[in-house]
Image (cartoon, coloured by chain):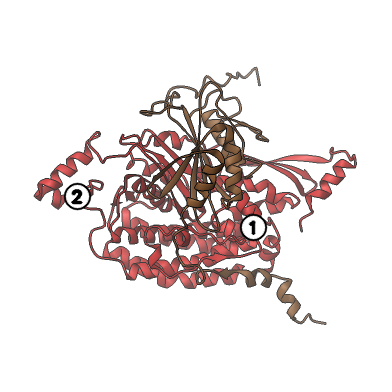
Chain colours: A brown, B red
Amino acid sequence: MPHRLGVADLFSHWYRTFLVVIFIGFFRMPHTPPPLDNVLQSLASRWGTLDVSTYRNQTRIVVAESVSLEVLEFLKAEGFDLLVDVTCVDYLEYRGALNRYGLVYLLTSTTTNQRLTVRVFVDDPTPCVRSVVPLWEAANWLEREVWDLFGIHFEGHPDLRRLLMPEEFAAHPLRKDYPLQGRGERHNFPILTRHDG
Amino acid sequence: MAIATTEFESAERAGHSKDYHWTLNFGPQHPATHTTLRIVLTLDGERVVDAQPEMGYLHSGFEKLGEHLTFNQYVTVTDRMNYISPMANNVAWHCAVEKLLGIDLTPRCRYIRTIVAELARLSDHLLSNGAVGLDTGAFTFFLYAFYQREVIYDIFETLCGARFTNSYTRVGGVSHDFTPLVVQKIRDFVKTFPKTLRDMEHLLTRNRIFVDRTQGVGVLSKAEAIGRGATGPVARASGVTRDLRKDEPYLAYEDFDFQVCCAVAGDCYARYCVRMQEMRESLKIIAQAIENLPAGAANVGIDQRAALPTKKQVYSTIEGTISHFELSMSNRGFAVPCEESYAATEAPNGELGFYIVGDGGESAYRARCRPPSVLHFALFPHLIRGHTLSDVVAVLGSLNIIAAELDR
C-alpha cells in the first residue's frame, strides 16, 4: 500500500527543517545598544574604581590580573554571553606603555548587542593569567593561540598546547623582540639525515 | 543517526578494552578537507569516537606582517586570508582601519563596498554549499555553483582587474570606482542568478540522499553555539538571531530591506538552508544598492587626507599636489592615533573583525584578525563525536573552514 502523506510527515522528514527556516528581519529593527552605565557602576561598586576609557563608541575597562576571572564571570552573568575574541598586544616598543603585555577580551551580549572590551595587563618574567575556559568554551583555542604566539601562560587551561606553530618551536613569534625575518625558521628543528630515518 | 557519547563512555567505564579503536589521519592533504588541515580521528569501526583537529599547516604570520606593512599594503594580505571571498576581507580590514583613523566614507563608497561585500558573500556561500554537495555526492550542484562564481569573478575582473586577489579597498575609498559596464554586469547578474538558485534548490534541497546525509548530523544547540563562539550562518542555523548587518549596521546596510535567515535545527542541513536563503537576501541587497547607487565621488575628499586625490586634482590644484605628495611619502601619510579599536563585519563565514593598535606610525602596531573559522573548527570534535566517518566531510563542509583564514 503506497504511503500517503499525512500531517505527521510534516514533522518527521525534511519538511521539519524547511518549516523552521524563519526570517526575523521583520521583527528586529536596527537599534543602538543601551549604555553600559549600569554594568560599569556595579563593577565599580564591587571592585573599586575602574580605569574606563572610550574610543569611537567602544568602552574598555582595565582589570587587575588578580581579579580578572571574577570580573569576567560577573560580566558573563550580566549578559555578556558571547566571547568574541581573546588576544594580546606586546607593548615592548609602545611609547609610554607601563606593562609589557596587554590581554584583550572582547565581550558581546547577544541579547542587547552591547560590547565591552576588558583588558588585563601582565608582565615578564612569567606572564600568567587565569584561563576563562570554564566560563566560555570559545576561549579554548583562542587562549592556546595567545600562548603559542605570545607565551602568556593560562592557569587552569585544560589543554594548553601550541595551536599554530609546531610543538618543537621554542620562541613566541608575535612578541616584539622576535624579528620578522631571519630567525627561528630552521634552527629550531633537528637536522635529519638519511641515516636517521 | 548519532550515538550519544555517553554510550562510549559507559563502555569504557565498564572496563572494556579500547584496543578496537583505531586512528585515522584525515588530511592535511585530502580532497575533502578542501584546504590544508588535519584531523586525527579515533574510530570504532565506522563511528568517530573522538577527533583531534590540528592546524597550522598554512600559518604564514599574517598578523606579524600586519605590523610591518602599511594600512594600504596590508589589504593584499587580507586577500589571502579567506580566499573564497577576498572582497569581504578587504572591506573588513579597511572598515577597521577607518574606524581607528576616524574617516567618514562617502555615500557612494559605502554602497560600493556593500555591493562587493554581498557579492563576496554570494560567492562564498556558493562554494560552501557547493562543497557540501560535492562531498555528499552531488557533483552537478557543485558545477552549477561554480559557474555562478565565475560570473562573480568576471564582475570583479571588470571592476578592478583582478579575479581572485582583488585588493579592492583603500583607506578612505576603493581602488576603482564603478563604471557603467560594472553596473550593467551586476544588473545582469541580479536578473539571471535567481533562476540558477532555483535550479540549485531543486537539485538538492529536497534530494533524499542529500537530506539523509545531512539532517540530524552535527547538531549544535543554541547555547553551545553562543558559548563556543560560533557566529555567522553556523550560529544562525542554531537559532542565534545575530547578524551584524542588522545588529550593528555598518556601511550602508541600514538603508536596505533584507531579512536575517535563521533556523533552529542546528544540523548540517539547517546550515545549508540558511546559506541558501542568505543568498536570496544578499541578492535583494545588491539589487537595491545597485539601483540606488549614489552619485558623487567614491573616495573621500582631499581634506580628510586619506585617499589619493584624482589626477585632475593633482595636476590642477595645489591641495591635490600636496596631498598626493604627502600620501606617497613613507613618513608623511595620514595621522594615526595612539589608540586601539576593534571593528567587526559580518563576513560570509561569521564575524570577521580586526583589532588594530595604532602607535602613530604608518603601519599598525598590532593587527589582530578575529577569524570565524578558528572558532568553528574548534567546534568540530564536538559536532562529529558519535557520527560515522562519512559524516566527517558533511560536517566539515557545512562549517566552511578555510585553512588560510584558520592559520593566517
Secondary structure under tag 1 reads helix
Task: Give the x, y percent position of residue B330.
Answer: 25, 34
Residues B99 and B161: in front is B99
Q: Is residue B391 above or below residue B289?
A: above
Residues B201 and A7: in front is A7
Name the amino acid type tagged 1.
Lys
Dividing the picture into quadrants, the one containing residue A158 is top right
Q: How many marks?
A: 2
Dividing the picture into quadrants, the one containing residue B159 is bottom left
Task: Give the x, y percent position of residue B244.
Answer: 47, 57
The Cα atoms of the two marked residues, 1 and 2, are separated by 48 Å
For disc 1, the chain is B
Secondary structure under tag 2 reads helix
Q: Is residue A143 left or right of residue B44?
A: left
Q: Is residue B229 above or below residue B212?
A: above
- Residue A18 seen from this side: yes
Q: Residue at 56% x, 62% y: name it.
A: B241
Label at residue B302 = 2
Residue picked out by circle 1: B222
For disc 2, the chain is B
Task: Give the x, y percent position of residue B58.
Answer: 52, 38
Q: Is residue B234 above or below residue B81?
A: below
Name the amino acid type tagged 2.
Ile
